[in-house]
């Protein structure tokens, strides 16, 4: 595409309405595909089901209540994962001794999928909120640690030398060089962790919960309410997209020196 | 008002040694082999002198600078600054790195103010000071730019301004113009002499370019290839500044040095 066309107004308008068009197209294809079968609900069915949610909430919890229930678990678990994972990643990335002692252990624990922890977590924390948050924590802490660690290891020696030559203490080197230099790697880890957190929260809620989007799906499935299932899936998609957009925005604010390849 | 400049007001004692390197050697040991990088190098640097260390690529000049700056420890030998044994990083030393070493996450202004930040100078004060050095290297107008938005020559100016902003008494420059194109290189050479004239410091400048060495140096110390030893010392104090690349005396010195050097194109 030549530059003139790229800058033209028509192109810009097209760029703005293209997402709308693609969604509408998808919805109409869906409508056509589901019309006759009857097993798959039509978009309209889903839309009506969503309307009915306002009148008759699932398990007496409003839609926003369910969203918030899932969101709270995700954010708490993710926060715990970051609070523990970032310092731990910095530690094993920066200090060779700590790396020698702790990394092998970490490498052994890392491949265990978070969901494998469910029985232990239930044993320790019961089936309430704590065990769900703990489960999300185990899933999110891994990518955060690995990304932080890798980010620290990839810092060019020259940047550390610069700090040393100008008289930085070890603490200053970490604060002024190591953290800013590995920040975008850390952010990438947080983004991955966010995705993992959603997978885990859904699974945890489908196993045992009485609120949340995972609960909505499993309730819909139990009573053969497919429109409800699909509506919950759409909500999950939208929230995931919004959260990822927020993180990208935060990364741009935190790392303004980075340019994305477009 | 300017505490930074007051040091230069102290009249240099002619011929006083600012820095002395005594019988310095450096051996690198990897696994079961070892490599002698520097062998028994001794040299003096006079106060406010522009000393050029000239030697073939990878001969160990950078290693020597890293030892002087305190980033590396010598295997044997000592470095004295103001007749005092210098061990580890010395706050009197500013460093312009070969690979630039500008921090990509900091703006030009924050890069230049970086040494002051480490020394906990309040923000306003350190920006004021940074501005002075940004103006000195001709980067005014680019204070808020990030390094990726700058050309190679401009990034190198950031490195120079930062080294100056650390208010060093000794400025180490490790092939600072090595990666620049010829045109930028010439203008940066003039720039660095201009700054040096305005703001006298003891400069140790490393290069592998004979022409650059003769153009810049008060004295040139010529090194051999690895292991690095001193091959000769050339005093250019009688060669008037500003120097002319095509001046016959300039060309004579250049020829003389190139006849004695190991600088070979590999």
Image (cartoon, coloured by chain):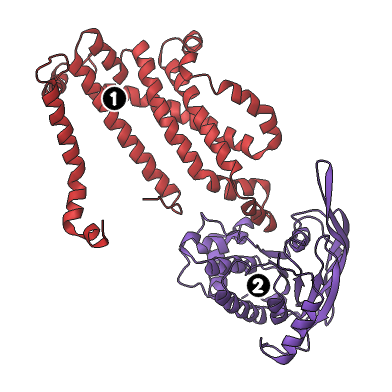
- The colour with which the image depicts chain B is purple
The relative height of residue A78 versus residue B33 in the rendered view (above or below) is above
Horizontal side of residue B111 vs A256, given as left or right: right
In the figure, residue A148 lies in which quadrant? top right
x and y, in percent, of residue A143 in the image: 50, 31
Return the residue found at the far front: B266
Q: Quadrant of the C terminus of chain B?
A: bottom right
The relative height of residue A143 versus residue B3 in the rendered view (above or below) is above
x and y, in percent, of residue A187 in the image: 46, 40
Q: Which residue position holds label 2? A: B4
Residue visible at 35% across and 19% down in the picture? A202
Q: Between residue B172 and residue B169, name the one nearer to us.
A: B172
x and y, in percent, of residue B7 in the image: 72, 75
Q: Quadrant of the N terminus of chain B?
A: bottom right
Question: Rounded to the nearest whole Å, what is the CA distance between mark 1 and mark 2?
Answer: 60 Å
Horizontal side of residue B98 vs B59, given as left or right: left
Q: Which residue position holds label 1? A: A67
Please give the chain letter of the residue carrying mark 2.
B
């Amino acid at each position: 595409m030549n530059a003139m066309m790229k800058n033209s107004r028509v192109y810009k308008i097209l760029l703005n309405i293209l997402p709308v068009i693609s969604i509408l197209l998808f919805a109409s294809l869906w409508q056509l595909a589901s019309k006759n079968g009857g097993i798959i609900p039509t978009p309209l069915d889903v839309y009506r089901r969503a309307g009915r949610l306002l009148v008759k909430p699932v398990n007496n919890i409003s839609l926003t209540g369910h969203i918030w229930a899932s969101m709270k678990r995700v954010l708490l678990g993710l926060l715990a994962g970051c609070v523990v994972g970032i310092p731990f990643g910095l530690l094993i990335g920066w200090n060779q001794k700590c790396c020698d002692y702790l990394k092998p252990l970490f490498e052994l624990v890392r491949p265990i999928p978070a969901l494998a922890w469910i029985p232990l977590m239930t044993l320790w924390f019961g089936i309430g909120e704590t065990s769900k948050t703990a489960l999300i924590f185990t899933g999110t802490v891994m990518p955060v640690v690995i990304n932080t660690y890798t980010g620290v290891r990839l810092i060019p020696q020259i940047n550390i030398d610069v700090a040393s030559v100008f008289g930085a203490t070890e603490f200053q080197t970490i604060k002024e060089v190591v953290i800013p230099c590995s920040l975008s790697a850390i952010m990438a880890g947080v983004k991955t962790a966010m995705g993992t957190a959603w997978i885990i929260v859904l699974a945890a809620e489908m196993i045992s919960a009485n609120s949340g989007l995972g609960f909505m799906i499993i309730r819909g499935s139990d009573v053969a309410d497919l429109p409800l299932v699909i509506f919950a899936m759409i909500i999950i998609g939208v929230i995931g997209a919004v959260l990822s957009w927020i993180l990208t925005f935060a990364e741009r604010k935190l790392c303004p020196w980075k340019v994305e390849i477009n | 008002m300017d505490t930074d400049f007051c040091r230069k007001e102290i009249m240099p004692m002619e011929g006083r040694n600012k820095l002395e390197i005594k019988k310095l050697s450096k051996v690198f040991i990897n696994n079961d082999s070892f490599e002698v990088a520097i062998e028994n190098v001794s040299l003096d640097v006079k106060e406010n002198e522009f000393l050029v260390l000239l030697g073939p690529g990878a001969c160990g000049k950078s290693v020597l600078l890293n030892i002087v700056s305190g980033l590396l420890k010598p295997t044997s030998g000592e470095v004295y600054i103001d007749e005092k044994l210098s061990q580890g990083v010395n706050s009197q030393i500013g460093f312009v790195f070969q690979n630039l070493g500008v921090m990509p996450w900091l703006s030009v202004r924050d890069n230049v103010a970086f040494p002051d930040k480490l020394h906990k100078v309040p923000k306003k004060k350190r920006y004021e000071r940074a501005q002075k050095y940004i103006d000195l290297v001709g980067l005014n107008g680019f204070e808020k730019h990030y390094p990726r938005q700058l050309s190679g020559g401009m990034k190198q100016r950031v490195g120079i301004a930062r080294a100056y902003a650390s208010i060093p008494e000794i400025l180490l420059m490790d092939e600072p113009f090595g990666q620049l194109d010829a045109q930028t290189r010439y203008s940066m050479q003039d720039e660095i002499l201009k700054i040096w004239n305005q703001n006298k410091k003891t400069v140790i400048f490393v290069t592998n370019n004979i022409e650059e060495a003769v153009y810049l140096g008060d004295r040139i110390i010529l090194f051999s290839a690895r292991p690095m030893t001193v091959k000769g010392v050339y005093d250019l104090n009688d060669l008037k500044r500003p120097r002319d690349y095509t001046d016959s005396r300039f060309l004579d010195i250049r020829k003389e040095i190139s006849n004695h050097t190991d600088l070979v194109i590999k």
